Image (cartoon, rainbow, N blue to C red):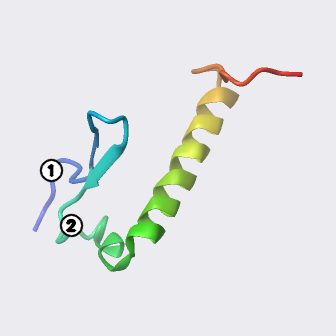
Amino acid sequence: MTYSEDSLRVTENDDGTLGVEWDPNDPKYSFLNTMTQDELQSYFTRALEEFIKECEANGYIHSSKSHT
């Protein structure tokens, strides 16, 4: 089967939390199928932290943390 678009979907819920869905048959994300809820949360938290750091390093966004 060929996937013409990315099957990973991230949505923001009304309460501000994020929801993540993917096609369990998509070979790109099938490794997520065996993860527990805690493992998924940890995986996506680390991925988002790395993405934010990369964006800050490239000047795409600026940190909202105060520098003391």
Tell whether label 2 touches label 1 (CB within 8 Å).
no
Picture residue at 36% right of the left edge, 35% below the top = 16
Distance from disc 1 to disc 2, alpha carbons, whole Å, reads 11 Å
Q: Which callout, 1 or 2, points to the residue nearer the camera? A: 2
Quadrant of residue 56 within the rendered picture: top right
Report whether 25 appears left or right of 63. Answer: left
Is 32 situated above or below 47?
Answer: below
Q: Residue at x 58, y 36 (%)?
A: 52
Quadrant of the image occupied by residue 30: bottom left
Instruction: Using the image, tell me which numbered label, if any, was put on residue 26.
Output: 2
Residue name at image x 29 percent, y 75 percent: 33
Residue to which mark 1 is pinned: 4
Q: Position of residue 19 (x, y in %)?
A: 29, 48
Viewer-closest of 64 and 29 = 64
Q: Is residue 20 left or right of residue 58?
A: left
Q: Secondary structure at mark 1?
A: loop
Q: Label 1 crowding class (10 Å Cα cut-off): few <14, some 14-19, many 20+?
A: few
Check the image and report above or below for 59 versus 57: above
Q: Is residue 54 above or below residue 45?
A: above
* Quarter of the figure with the N terminus: bottom left
Q: Residue at x 23, y 49 (%)?
A: 6
Type of the residue with mark 1: Ser
Residue 39 lies, in percent from the top left, at: 47, 70
Q: Which element type, helix, strand or loop, lies under badge 2?
A: loop
> Tag 2 or tag 1, which sits nearer the N-term?
1
The tag on residue 28 is: none
Left or right of residue 36, residue 27 in this image: left
Quadrant location of the C terminus in the rendered image = top right
Kind of residue at badge 2: Asp
Which residue is nearer to you in this view: 53 or 6? 53
In the picture as drawn, the residue positioned furthest to the left comes out as: 1
Q: Say if 10 sits above or below 59 in the image.
A: below
